[in-house]
Amino acid sequence: MSKNTKSTLKANNTEQDHNTSDKLWDGRFSQPTDAFVEAFTASVSFDQRLYRHDIMGSKAHAAMLSKIGVLTESECQTIISGLDEITADIESGNFSWSIKLEDVHMNIEARLTDKIGDTGKKLHTGRSRNDQVATDIRLYLRDEIDAVVAELKRLQLGILSLAELEADTIMPGFTHLQTAQPVTFGHHLLAWCEMLFRDVARFQDCRARVNIMPLGAAALAGTSYPIDRAYTAELLGFDAVTENSLDAVSDRDFVIEFVSAASILMMHLSRYSEELILWSSAQFNFVELSDSFCTGSSIMPQKKNPDVPELVRGKTGRVQGHLVCLLTLMKGQPLAYNKDNQEDKEPLFDTIDTIKSCLKVYADMMPNIAVNRDAMRLAAAQGYSTATDLADYLVRKGMPFRDAHSVVGKSVAYGIEQQKDLSELSLKELQNFSDMISDDVFDVLTLEGSVAARDHIGGTAPKQVIAAIKRAHTKL
Ligand code: ARG
């Protein structure tokens, strides 16, 4: 949302005196709302974040009403300038939000009538807050998805730059967190980048279903005015209009879908975090995060803690919690709109804030990761990571793979006993396990030979990493 909504929130709105009470709906009521209930049912403290999109929707609605002759051209102009003034008031902090007016929609509508008089009362013709709020959330979310995707791409670019520098840096690849086979660090980073490509695709896919216009569904059944929904949709940049008015005002599956994509993104960021935390420990010592992204301990002077990845890992929980919250919110609701739906906003807003800040801090941190290539190489050299290469070598010499597996297993056991890596055993020692081994074996036992041999699309060879980085740039 705009940074400058410093507007105040008032329980008692003394400035506005457009009605005997402040309510826009109390014609049939003979008693005032209980003060606590008023606060309990109000959403303006959090939905004021939608003001820009609410006003955008109202301007398009007014233009459509004028096109079909429900408003005169001059009434429409008066409404539009009134709404523009309200935008300026909100953004300069001159708007007092009132909980008596419940939500962002009625605060803005009431203020409009204060400003322009009775014409303001005509804006809500052929519309309900039910289709209005659904429209606002979709307009707002559409913008936020674009912002999230832009930040995701910035993070991907950071990962690709580091991957390019580390295309032939050798590190141990792990399965079960045990050293498995040598890989290049560039290749490992490209794995992160691939996950993010799928996240981008999920958000873009979600956007296609967000960008459908509910306006015109009115309260639940549509409206008796001869509205031109296609015209309003075009003004607002929607791809289409909703097909069914009951569905349009009631479903929030597009919010659930977004938060679901956000949960998967956070799961990915949490996995990167876990790796960065492990790697920056003294035990791994593969990377060092810059001082500006770490904090110290108040008692242990030697500590430099990877707080940023830890917090990102921690924040994953709240986004996943929001997903469960929203699924549960929807599951019991009969058609059409129910007030339950007002509870969609806080989890959605917090999800957006959380993923945007996590993406920002990660994109900023990427170029500030120092790589300890020696420690990575040493770790790869120590874990018998080329054992599979020796087995493949024997297979190429004619041995069935299962037999080769067993021969290499015995060589590894011998190496452990001698405290030597396979590449440190002499040819004579190796030949004790198979006479098919000759002196060309050392080409495959080196770490460089091992990674260079995985030379196909998706493989870890430095040459393939460079090619994959090029393809990734093209996709971005
Ligand atoms: N503040 C409400 C919400 O967020 C707006 C719609 C209210 N509609 C109603 N009929 N009370 O859902």
Image: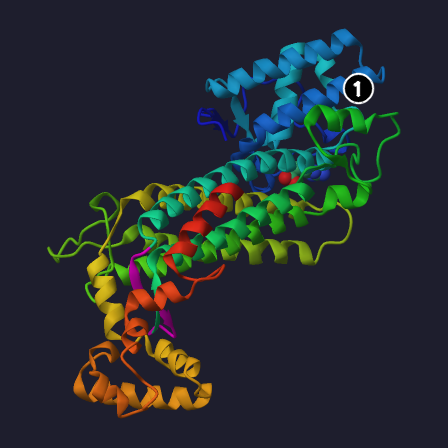
> What is the crowding at mark 1: few (fewer than 14 residues within 10 Å), some, or many (at least 20)?
many
| Residue 282: quadrant of the picture | bottom left
Q: Residue at x 30, y 76 (%)?
A: 440
Magenta span covers which residues?
168-179
- Disc 1 residue type? Leu
- Please say if 162 is above or below 377: above
Viewer-side residue, 125 vs 76: 76
**Along the horizontal axis of the image, is 234 left or right of 3?**
right
Q: Residue at x 51, y 23 (%)?
A: 96
Q: Is residue 340 visible?
A: yes
**Along the horizontal axis of the image, is 244 left or right of 456?**
right
User: Which x, y percent locates residue 210?
Assistant: 66, 41
Tag 1 secondary structure? helix
| Residue 58: quadrant of the picture | top right
Q: Residue at x 59, y 49 (%)?
A: 202
Question: Looking at this rendering, what residue extends furthest in the top direction?
Answer: 74
Viewer-side residue, 463 vs 93: 463
**Along the horizontal axis of the image, is 285 left or right of 352?**
left
Residue under pointer 1: 65
**Along the horizontal axis of the image, is 38 left or right of 412?**
right
User: Which x, y percent locates residue 259?
Assistant: 56, 50
User: Which x, y percent locates residue 156?
Assistant: 43, 45
Viewer-side residue, 17 vs 460: 460
Q: Which colouring convention does the figure follow?
A: rainbow
Q: Is residue 269 visible?
A: no
Which quarter is ligand 1 in?
Answer: top right
Main secondary structure found in the magenta portion = strand
Q: Is residue 178 magenta?
A: yes
Question: Looking at this rendering, what residue extends furthest in the bottom direction?
Answer: 432
Viewer-side residue, 369 vs 48: 369
- Please say if 411 is above or below 346: below
